[in-house]
Every structure is written in C-alpha cells, then in structure tokens.
Image (cartoon, grey):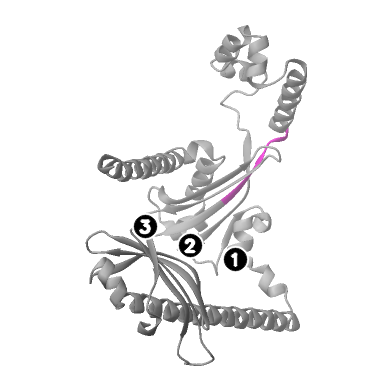
Amino acid sequence: MAAAMLTKPRLIGGAWTAIGTAGGYSLYRSIRDFEDKSPCVREAVHFLASSSTARATLGGGDLMIARWPRHRSLDLSSGLARASFEVRGDAGSAFVVVGARRRARASQAYEQALDDDEDEELAVGTGWRRYWSRPWELKQDFLNTFRSQASASAAGFDDEEPIWDIDSLFILPGGDTQNPVVLAGNPVGLPEYEAMCVRRDAESKGEKSRWRLRVVTGIALMAAGFAGGARVLKSMRVSQSYGFVRRSLQAHSDVNSALGRSIFVQSSSGTFGDRYISARLRLVGDGGAVADVEVAATRGAGSAPWIIAMARMSVGGLSYNLDRSQF
C-alpha cells in the first residue's frame, strides 16, 4: 500500500513532465520553422526593407523577426495563406500581417495531384490496406520522398520558382491598431485587419440594436446574479445543518464513549436541508474506531429548533439508538 501511494505521485509528475516537454518541443518547432513553413514571410521582410514608409518606423538597419508573437494559417484547398509577426529594427518595431495567394500554375498542379491521388486511392485503397495488398509499393513510396525534387523539376516547379505571391500586407507601427499602414493590396479580407483595425461588427449596429444588446446583457447578468445568490444561500443552509449534526455528534456522550473525545467525520451523504435532514455519516475516533451514524430531523420555519426523529449508531457490529435529547 505504501509503495503504491509513493508511486502514484511519481506517475502523475512524470505524466505532467511528458506533457510539458511535448508542448515545449512543439512550440519550439513552431517558432523554429515559422519562416520555412509560412509562405511569403521572407518576401514580406524584404518588402519592408525596401519600403520607405516601413523604414520610417523601423529605421535603416537590419530587420529581425521577433520570436513572439508568431502566427500562421495555411489553406491548401483555397490556395490562401496568412501570417502575422513582429518585426524589429534599430529605430522601432511594427506588427506585420501578410496575406499570400498561390499562383495559378501552382494551383493547377496541386489540383491535378489531388485528382491523381483520389484516382489511385479508388483503385488500390488507402492506408495499410493498400500496402498489405501491394507490399512492394512501401519501398517505392519511401524512395519517392527523396525523388520529390526531381519530379517537381520535371513538372516545371523547382525550388527556384516562387509558388506564392504577396496578396496584401499591412503593418501596425508600434502595435497601434488605430493607425494601420497598408503597404500592398487590400487587407479588408484578412481576419486580423477586420478584428484589430476595422471593428465593423460594432460600428454596423444601430443605436436601437445596441440598446437591445445592453438590455439583454443586463437581464442575463441579473439572472446570473440571482442564480449565484440562491446558490450561495443554499450552500450556507447546507453548511449550517451539516454543522449542527457534526457538532452534536462530536459532543454526544454515547459517541464519545464508543470512539473517544477526538472525533472527525470521514464521509457524509444524504440531505442537509434548511428544514429537513436525512443523512448518514461515518465517524472515526482517535484510536481508529469507526462508527456509522444515521440522523433524521425536521424543524419549522426560521430559527426553530431541530426535532430529532431518528439517531442510530452502528459500531463494532452493534446498532443502537442515541439519546436524542443531547442534540
């Protein structure tokens, strides 16, 4: 038993350590591979370096991407991507949001590859079922991963040809959302621009609509307040009835004779209401003796005294009634 109690905290600590390590490594890889896996991030930095408007905020020195914040989103199906990050220069910093669009030729090649994959899946199946029926293809697919560059070059898409173009680009000098500076394209379609700079949802509502929203919000807050208050009152009443039973049993002479003077409640169950009690408690004494006590009581409104209907204790295989006058 003692060994099991010592092992459990170690297992829990080991599990949390593994989770923390995996999360930290995932975050590290996301930061490390941000520029490689986010289309047009490097192009956006080059664009800022050659923009006089951006240089007025960042300065004339080298530009560096901050390690945080870094966010990216890539949708291969629609051929759209976006990234947001902070760029720092010798004179200041700016929050950058760039949207990228895949070129038409690259989109056609991507869609054709999807069609070819779907046709192949329909013909031979997917997953391990495919390799089970065609085991020689496992080696072929493994080798194809090293031939991807050659096959891309044969299709006219080598690494030297850009696949993505900057569609829109804006910066927030010093992170100021009130003064966005649009450097390329139209950023209206970017969620970051809509959320941080435009705030169209709030401006599109009329005065009557906002009044209704305030009324509904006020009603919801009042209802939540009443519910919370009722919950607190109920908890206080339960605490009072439970405390009455606990104190009465700890001071009861029959219980003290069976368990000793130092008694604590190990567990309790049942109903502890404002006017009704029907509960079962397990008591443990200082010598390790255990007793189960059943109590039922009622009382009138307000602060009327409790009327004990039943008080029975089971200890050492014997069960007998407790003196109700001591409650």
Question: Seen in the image, is 217 located left or right of residue 178?
Answer: right
Instruction: State the residue at coordinates (46%, 55%).
Output: 55
Foreground mark, 3 or 1? 3
In the rendered image, the vertical position of residue 182 relative to residue 139, given as above or below: below
Mark nearer the viewer, 1 or 2 = 1
Query: In this image, 122 relative to 51: left or right?
Result: right
Q: Which x, y percent locates residue 208?
A: 75, 83
Q: What secondary structure characterizes most of the magenta part?
A: strand
Taking 50 as reference, is 254 above or below it?
A: below
Quadrant of residue 327 in the image? bottom left
Lower sequence index among marks 3 and 1: 1
Q: Give amino acid for label 1.
A: Cys
Sooner in the amino-acid sequence: mark 1 or mark 2: 2
Crowd band around label 2 with a 10 angstrom C-alpha radius: few (<14), some (14–19), many (20+): many
Q: Which residues are magenta?
A: 98-104
Residue 197's tag is 1
**Mark-to-mark CA distance, 3 and 1:** 75 Å
**Type of amino acid at the residue the image marks with label 3:** Gly
Among the 4 quarters of the image, the one containing residue 243 = bottom left
Q: Label 3: which residue?
A: 317
Residue placed at 63% from the left, 33% from the top?
163
Residue name at image x 34 percent, y 78 percent: 247
SS at circle 3:
loop
Towards the viewer: 308 or 52: 308
4 falls in the magenta region: no
Q: Is residue 308 above or below residue 53?
A: below
For numbered disc 2, what is the local secondary structure?
strand
* Residue where numbered disc 2 is placed: 173
**Hey, what amino acid is under mark 2?**
Pro
